[in-house]
Image (cartoon, helix red, strand yellow):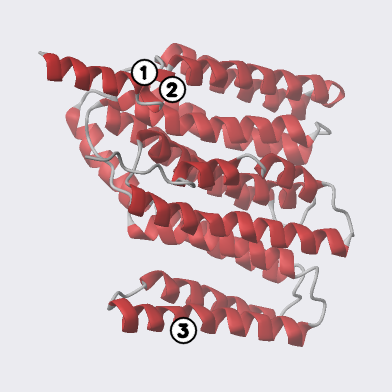
Amino acid sequence: MTEAKKPLITANMVTFARLLPMPLLAMWLYNLGESRSQLWAALIVGTIIGCTDFVDGYLARKQGPTVLGGLVDPIADKVFVALVYVPFVGTGVIPAWACALMFVREFIVTALRSSYEKRQLHMKTSYLAKVKTWTQMQGIGVLMLFPLINDQNIMSWVLGVGIVLPLIAMTILWVVRKKLWKGALVMSAALGALLAVHMKQDPHLTTAWFIMIIVVALTWISGIDYFVGAFKQLRGRGDLGGFDFARIAGALAVPCTMFAALVESPAPAWPLLTVLALELAVGGLDNLLAHHGAAAPASSWGARTLGASALMALCVVVKSAATPLAIAAAAICTAGVVWEFWRGRDYYVDARIRAKARAAATA
């Protein structure tokens, strides 16, 4: 029997190819200024990176899922959204409160997932949550188009095409595979509402706020199932403790203090972006380790998240020391997250799982 040929490109390769250039894209967006040519380039690069999500999804279905892929793929999606939206907060294009609310939801759902996994419960990802991710990516793409297309009539046509294309794709998918793509209806409806606002209001201010209202509303609506289910299952068990509270506290503190420091202090953006991206990343790892009973205790989790949050909050209070405080927050976060990934490496590279399988086979 011949051994199956190893694929030239795997889903995990595509995921890492999407994840690695994201910090560079974020800093690029942060420093674009009024350069239209660079903004066009950033839009094209960001669109290509975003579209690779469909590629690695296809490859994962074709080649079969892996533990590492299940960990890294949702991390890549969240980090992509974080590192693309945040620069628009720093430049004043979108309000900080809207972006903070979006990420509070992401952090809370990740924290609840760890609580579920610790108890060997399964938190199923809803279809609406997937639509939420598409809408977040769609929203940032439209936001980047507004400063590039100054003609209101042309922008109206662009939005009109954006309404029609998902419906065409939905129709083709139904004809070819008899599968209904419900997400197309949500995307077209959101762009339809946006077009109505755009045709009546200032396209550079009101429309940007409206985009964020749509994105934040869908983000939180998609989280209702998670919150209701968590309240019923976790509270009903009566075993909530420090593990859960430390993660919920960090989920609230990290995004709120990060955006406060970004907007209200002279701290540089890069250490704040570092904290946000790393905490999003380590949340996925925590889900995996919690499932195997190896998650970090409340003391170390709380020390990292709340310690970094306290330093970022101090950036707002002690503005003269904002830069070293932000760098210190990033250093604490980086050290803690690197340790978590090092400590849990046997789980996400499948080494310990394979060792258990071999032990069971020889028993």
| Residue 189 relative to residue 362: left or right | right
Mark 3 in CB contact with mark 2 (< 8 angstroms): no
Mark 2 in CB contact with mark 1 (< 8 angstroms): yes
The circle on residue 5 is none
* Chain-order first, disc 3 or disc 2: 3
Quadrant hosting residue 324: top right
Q: Residue under label 2, please give it.
A: 246
Q: In this view, does 103 lie above or below 257?
A: below
On-image quarter of the C terminus: top left
The residue at the point 68 percent across, 27 percent down is 313
- Mark 1 crowd level (few <14, some 14–19, many ≥20, 10 Å Cα): few
Q: Residue under label 1, please give it.
A: 242
Q: Please, which residue is most extreme toward the left here?
A: 363
Q: Residue 350's spot in the image, x, y percent?
A: 35, 26
The circle on residue 168 is 3
Q: Residue 80's spot in the image, x, y percent?
A: 59, 47
